[in-house]
Amino acid sequence: MKKARNYLLLLLLAAFAVHTLWLAIAPLVPYIIAALVVVLIVGFLYYRSTRW
C-alpha cells in the first residue's frame, strides 16, 4: 500500500511539473512557430539563390 501511495505521489508531482512547464512555455509557442517559418523561408530563398 505504501509503495502504491509513493508511486501516486510521484506521478502527481510529475504531472504538476509538466503543467508548470507548459504554463511557462505556452505563451512563447506562437513566437517560436513564427520564427521557424521565417527561418524556413530565408533558408529556402538562400538555397534557391545559390542554385541559380
Image (spheres, rainbow, N blue to C red):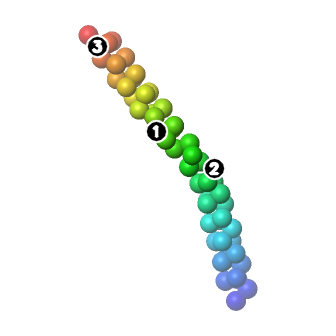
The numbered mark at residue 33 is 1
Residue found at the far bottom of this picture: 1
Could you tell me which secondary element the residue under label 3 belongs to? Answer: helix
| Neighbourhood count class around disc 1 (C-alpha, 10 Å): few under 14, some 14–19, many 20 upward | few
19 lies above or below 5? above
Three-letter code, disc 2 = Ala
Could you tell me which secondary element the residue under label 1 belongs to? Answer: helix
Residue at 64% x, 71% y is 11
For disc 3, the marked residue is 51
| Neighbourhood count class around disc 2 (C-alpha, 10 Å): few under 14, some 14–19, many 20 upward | few
Circles 3 and 2: CB atoms closer than 8 Å: no
Three-letter code, disc 3 = Arg
**23 with respect to 34 (left or right):** right
Between marks 3 and 2 in the image, the one whose residue lies nearer the viewer: 2
Residue 48 in the image: state x and y as whole percent: 30, 17
Q: Earlier in the sequence, mark 1 or mark 3?
A: 1
**23 with respect to 49 (left or right):** right
Report the quarter where the C terminus lies: top left
Q: Earlier in the sequence, mark 3 or mark 2?
A: 2
Three-letter code, disc 1 = Ile
Residue at 39% x, 23% y is 43
Residue 16 in the image: state x and y as whole percent: 66, 64
Residue 11 versus residue 2: which sits nearer the camera? 11
- Rendered image quadrant of residue 51: top left
Could you tell me which secondary element the residue under label 2 belongs to? Answer: helix
For disc 2, the marked residue is 24
